[in-house]
Image (spheres, rainbow, N blue to C red):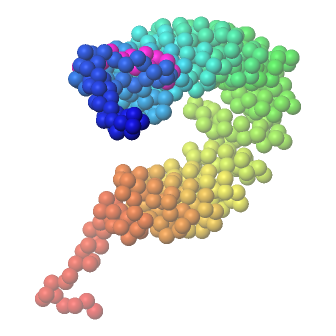
Amino acid sequence: MTRARHAAVRPSHLRLALVALVAGAAGLAACGEKPKPKPAPVETATAPTNAGPTTSVRVTAGGVELADAPEPVAKAALGLATQRPAAVKALVAAGAEAAPTAKALLQSKNLEEVRGALEYFTAVPTPDAAPAIAALLKHDAATVRDGARVALVATGGDALTASAVDLLDAKDPGVRVDAARTLASLDGAGVAAPKLQAMLSDADESVVAEAAVALSRVGGTLDEAALVALVTAEDTAAPTRRAALQVARRRGVAVPADALEKVLASEDEALAAEGARALKVAPEGEREKLVEKALADARPVVRRAVVEAFGHATVPELATAGLVVARKLAADPDATVRAASIYGLARGAEEDLAKVKGALGDESPLVRRAAAATLASMPGGQAAIIEALGKEQDAATERFMVGVLAAVPTRESLLAVANELSDKAVANDALLALGRVAQTVEYELDAEKWRGWIDQHYPPPAPPEDEKKDDAPAPKDAPAPK
């Protein structure tokens, strides 16, 4: 009997208990009290039922508290760990209002949050964040160091240059590399030249390479004698000698002829090639003899280096020498040397135009592409490319020619590209090339529509006046022509 009575009242007791529980929770909310936070790494605050201000502290996945962040900024910060691109976009949209939160995120234990904060500062440069960003140039993760470098360059300022110079002394080679890269991107970083020159003797080859690039760009004072000494000392490591030659070439520091001759004879192919590029800064009276020596080298990489060095020269004297070199090697047995020579003939005369046109029939696709690229800037070159396009058997070269033709849009070149829309191997590139010219994303694989667009925007030339007179209908009273 007792058991039956208890069983009969249990459902009603449950209902009463549930009502009391809900009422109690509502009462707590009305009093502004909050439940104890759960021990989770990330806590997202839930708005209370009375819509009053919340006192819950939001924490990102990387442990950054967002107590004072405006709601849109906090929401974006919480999304960085899983949806970085969209979250960064939201932070950038918030402008300077998001700067304090982004600065705090630089200390996050989550890499995505740190990278997101750096991307924010790249888009919204904030000078007072520069020290915190500079500290990340020492970070273990290369992606973070790269992001810090880009953000610092966007931020600018003398403090940035000073921070990067200090980091050239870091123990970690990766940090030294990033510091050199940062300085190479900055204006007024010539104060770093002495340290960068010292780094040419660094034990880490990647540091040496980046120091050479930076030293070539930042300006500042060079110790020219010490630089030449690095080239001439045969017991110096090959990477250091290459770097010193590169800096000398780019900064116009003369290198003695005997030193260059020894470098050209080096068994280290890369060093010999760098020596060939440095012939631009050889003493004038000795240069021609050294160039002939390099052109006779059995290694294609050395011969090609001579062509590339002189073929792109802007100084008239060197440009003339480059044309002579390109003519000599246009029929070289190595395809890479022939291709470099064809590029070097771009500023040539009528005889050179004939050589470049002839290269469209070369057995090597590499040379045929070089010929197409060179002809685009030469008189009458487009007609030769259009003719070759119809004969080309290599799909990759055909696509390259399509791009070359569309890069200098004329009626004839665009019609030739439109005609390629029927070839499956080339059609997509032709479509993209036409779309870039038309500046539209509404591409269609329809040659007739594109020809109509070309007619509208690149109409055929009007016939000469004398042709118009010949084609004009005769007066009604005039006798028909016999």
Q: Identify the residue at image location x=37%, y=27%.
A: 75
Horizontal placement of 467 versus 175: left or right? Answer: left
The residue furthest left is 477
| Coordinates of residue 267 in the picture (x, y in percent) | 87, 31
Question: In which quarter of the view is residue 461 placed?
Answer: bottom left
Q: Main secondary structure of the magenta part?
A: loop
| Coordinates of residue 283 in the picture (x, y in percent) | 72, 22
| Front-most of residues 22 and 61 | 22
Q: Identify the residue at image location x=56%, y=55%.
A: 400
Residue 161 seen from this side: yes
Q: Identify the residue at image location x=49%, y=9%.
A: 131
- Give the extent of the magenta segment: 52-66
| Front-most of residues 253 and 441 | 441
Question: In which quarter of the view is residue 2 placed?
Answer: top left
| Quarter of the rendering occupied by the C terminus | bottom left
| Front-most of residues 3 and 218 | 3
Question: In which quarter of the view is residue 249 placed?
Answer: top right
Horizontal placement of 93 versus 211: left or right? Answer: left
| Coordinates of residue 119 in the picture (x, y in percent) | 46, 26
| Front-most of residues 117 and 350 | 117
The residue furthest front is 1
Whether residue 402 is situated above or below residue 44 in the rendered picture: below
Q: Is residue 64 magenta?
A: yes
Residue 218 seen from this side: no
| Quarter of the rendering occupied by the N terminus | top left
Q: Is residue 191 magenta?
A: no
| Coordinates of residue 282 in the picture (x, y in percent) | 72, 24
